[in-house]
Image (cartoon, grey):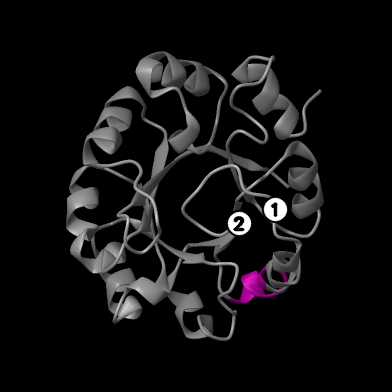
Amino acid sequence: MHKLICPSLMVADWQNIEKEIKELNEADIDIYHLDIMDGSFVPNMALGVEDVEAVRKLTTKTIDVHLMVQNPQNFIDLFADLGVNIIYIHPEADQIPSRTLQTIKERGIHPGLAINPGTSINSVHELLPLVDYVLVMTVDPGFSGQPFLEYTIPKIKTLAEIKSNYHYQLMVDGAISENRIDELSSIGVEGFIVGSSALFRKNDNYKTIVKRLKGGC
């Protein structure tokens, strides 16, 4: 199975972002992952409009935005106009998530559903036919550097087992190390949001690391 390697730019070196993106492009990453936090839905603030705009100018690769914000329906047009390719929302943050997912699709963008560690599959089951990507959070959202939550694995396995019924791609985000990529890929996960656990601030260059994460030598 082809592994989608998706750098989480929240932990990139933003003082040298042009160099970072150039080297990641050359390493043949698959999707740039940008966390948008409002300090309300999650207790932190992160990337914003200017950051998404900057990355879009530096790459032709796929860009996703992970909206960790209250009322994500209010932000769809804003980020769609910036040229992103995937938009993830949290159903808990939206009064009518089905309508918001439909709005994303109508803008020609892939709708994605982000599922928190404490959110059950049953509570989002009806939304699965509406999305192209399902992102399982394996840490509580809002902060980098947290440990992987083992209790999310049964949920990942179930979502992997049923994905052929819905045709979404299954992604994971949070403390994703090289060993986790091997483990979760074997049960059907296709995409991996990688940060400091697997990619950034390592001794090897990005090209070497990405090749290894994808299963090369």
Of the pair 82 and 46, the residue shown nearer to us: 46
Q: Find residue 174 and report its horizontal and vertical position in percent.
A: 60, 50
Q: Find residue 149 and report its horizontal and vertical position in percent.
A: 70, 59
- Magenta region: which residues? 159-165
Q: SS for tag 1?
A: loop
Give the residue furthest to the front: 43
Q: Are marks 2 and 1 in contact (CB under 8 Å)?
A: yes
Left or right of residue 52, residue 42 in this image: right
Residue picked out by circle 1: 148
Residue picked out by circle 2: 139
Of the pair 13 and 64, the residue shown nearer to us: 13
Question: What is the CA distance from the residue labelled 2 to the residue labelled 1?
Answer: 6 Å
Q: Find residue 114 and report its horizontal and vertical position in percent.
A: 48, 64
- In the displayed structure, 137 sits above or below 53; it is below
Q: Residue at x 48, y 22 (%)?
A: 25
Q: Amino acid at mark 1?
A: Phe
Picture quadrant of residue 122: bottom right
